[in-house]
């Protein structure tokens, strides 16, 4: 699990770097969605993985729960970046809410399947 935590941390730093570079070339326009997109994989990925990795008797979630959780993190991160790009561009889109909805449903599904594993 500590390897997964390291991977999530690296992804968080890459997302933060992408946001910084994107906003550097956006002529002073910024979006909180872009600025804080790195926090999604950090808080929902690295922190729980580190917690499970540091426990002696950690119960690992089933593979389907892990896949749903990872897909939810990915959907929320991409959705946050997309919302940031849309805001920096100066427009809006109704499609950005789909990322939050689908990502949240995947996280909830992953959590429920981890709780009710056989």
Image (spheres, rainbow, N blue to C red):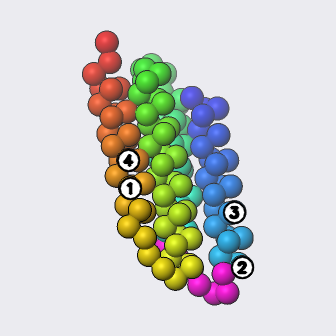
The residue carrying mark 2 is 25
Position of 97 relative to 7 (above/below)? below
**What is the x, y in percent for residue 96?**
42, 63
Task: Give the alpha-carbon distance from disc 3 to disc 1, as whole Å.
Answer: 25 Å
The answer to whether the residue labelled 1 contacts the one labelled 4, judged by CB atoms less than 8 Å apart, is yes
Task: Give the alpha-carbon distance from disc 3 to disc 2, as whole Å.
Answer: 13 Å
Who comes first in sequence, dot 3 or dot 1?
A: 3
Judge whether residue 3 can be spotted in this image. Answer: yes
The residue carrying mark 4 is 102
The answer to whether the residue labelled 3 contacts the one labelled 1, judged by CB atoms less than 8 Å apart, is no
In the picture as drawn, the residue positioned furthest to the top comes out as 118
The residue carrying mark 1 is 98
The image quarter in which residue 25 lies: bottom right
Position of 90 relative to 70 (above/below)? below
- Is residue 4 toward the left or the right of residue 110 in the image? right
User: What's drawn in magenta, residue-wise?
Assistant: 26-32
Task: Give the alpha-carbon distance from disc 3 to disc 4, as whole Å.
Answer: 25 Å
Who comes first in sequence, dot 2 or dot 4?
A: 2
The residue at 50%/38% (across/down) is 70
Who comes first in sequence, dot 3 or dot 2?
A: 3
The image quarter in which residue 116 lies: top left
- Is residue 89 toward the left or the right of residue 60 in the image? right
Task: Give the alpha-carbon distance from disc 1 to disc 4, as whole Å.
Answer: 6 Å
Disc 4 secondary structure class: helix
């Amino acid at each position: 699990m500590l390897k997964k935590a390291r991977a999530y941390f690296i992804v968080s730093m890459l997302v933060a770097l992408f946001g910084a570079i994107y906003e550097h070339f956006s002529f002073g326009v910024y979006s909180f969605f872009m600025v804080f997109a790195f926090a999604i994989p950090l808080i929902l990925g690295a922190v729980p993985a580190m917690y499970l990795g540091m426990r002696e008797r950690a119960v690992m979630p089933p593979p389907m729960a892990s896949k749903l959780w990872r897909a939810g993190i990915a959907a929320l991160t991409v959705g946050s970046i997309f919302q940031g790009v849309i805001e920096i561009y100066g427009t809006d889109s109704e499609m950005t809410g789909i990322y939050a909805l689908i990502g949240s449903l995947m996280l909830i599904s992953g959590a429920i399947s981890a709780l009710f594993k056989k």
